[in-house]
Image (tube, helix red, strand yellow):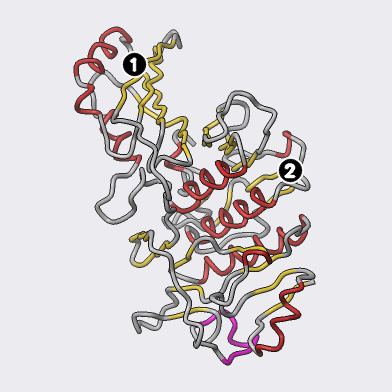
Amino acid sequence: MNSLEELFTVNGILKDTNNDGYANGLKGFVVINENSAMTVKKIAVNLCARIGHESISLDLPILKISEESSDIKVNSIVIDLNFESKSIDKNKAKIELIKGDVDYIKLTAGSECSLDFGGSYLYSRLPYVWEVGENSLKLNTIRNYFNKQELVNESSISKIILDNGYQGIWNLVIRLETDNIAELTDWLKKNKELIKYNNIGNMEFILVNTESNNKFFINVKSCDQIKLKNVKSANKLNNSNANTKLKEDIYKFNNDYVKDFDIANFYSIKGIFKDEDNDFLPDKIDTKIIVSDNACDEEIIAASNIAAKLSIESLGVEFPIIYTECEFNDNITNPIFIGNTSKSIDYLGNNHILCKIK
């Protein structure tokens, strides 16, 4: 993987095993530590759903529980929450492409709240800068702009820093390879007004001499980094005719809508999916996964497998796809309960509990 925006493509974590142009395999895993915080586990499940959405088939499991760095495979996504680190502000989350013997993506933050914010961006917005839609700005558009410049041999996006109170990317780090650092530095300074983008507070450039590997750093402030309150994350992702669309409006379930189906038609529009535009294709997942507030690693692996399977079979997925018992509410219909959840016992009386995995 050369750049962060490639993550959910065949240049990133996915692979095309039969060269037909479609992702149908996986190069790496989603990796978390044993007994991670529930925030980490929920991000992992949502990432598995996003990976499933971008593929036409996958070998499960996608989630790997490990404490050994040697278990990290190329192009994996590693979620790490280390509050002892003083290098990250408590309001910040960092998504970084780590280059070395094994290239991988690392998500970390200064607090659980910031990690949740960064994770939401990763599984529901990337590769968009912020707003998501057909005409919205993507990170690869920014990268392609620099690749077209005569002084730039190659560009790559190496780091994204988010602030949980800022609507956009707080700091975008771009690596530019060049034969002449001095000339490229002058060009960046002269054209800084042309490389300012909405929803990007600051751009940091790492200029690297292609031959000597010498580095130089330069910053361009794109706009005022004004913190915003009540920032909503994108939560709806559709994939139809190769077009991806996310919406920020929160989807409201219809409390009166209860399906009458069984395991035989589970993965169909007569079962757990909806066909909202009457084209006989599943475009919405009509369920959420519910786990206990202290779900064990095995239960989270089961949840991640189900999330990936649901997303593969549907043209659309809405985030988050997983909730804990304490987050469960009456607006959620057809829930899939995993493990020993007290809510699943209470829900039996409603006659539309869907599935309980022990």
Asked whether 354 falls inside the magenta stretch, the response is no
Q: Based on the picture, tell me whether residue 263 belongs to the magenta stretch.
A: yes
Residue 199 spot, x, y in % from top left: 32, 39
Residue toward you, 59 or 138: 138
Q: Which residues are magenta?
A: 260-268
Residue occupying the point 41% across, 30% down:
171
Q: Is residue 29 above or below residue 246?
A: above
**Left or right of 272 in this view: 179:** left
- Of the two numbered discs 1 and 2 in the rendering, the one whose residue sits closer to the viewer: 2
Query: Which quadrant of the figure has residue 112?
Result: top right
Name the secondary structure under disc 2. Answer: loop
Instruction: Name which quarter of the figure residue 315 lies in.
Output: bottom left
**Dot 2 amino acid type:** Asn
Determine which residue is flagged by label 1: 178
Q: Residue sitting at 57 percent across and 33 percent down?
A: 90
User: Residue 31 at what x, y percent from top left?
Assistant: 67, 45
- Mark 1 residue crowding within 10 angstroms, few (<14) / some (14–19) / many (20+): many
What residue is shown at x 43% (from left), y 50% (from top)?
Answer: 230
Mark 1 / mark 2, whichever is N-terminal: 2
Residue of label 2: 33
Helix, strand or loop at disc 1? strand
Q: Main secondary structure of the magenta part?
A: loop
* Alpha-carbon span between mark 1 and mark 2: 38 Å
Q: Position of residue 45 (x, y in %)?
A: 62, 57
Local packing at callout 2 (Cα closer than 10 Å; few below 14, some 14-19, many 20+) is: some
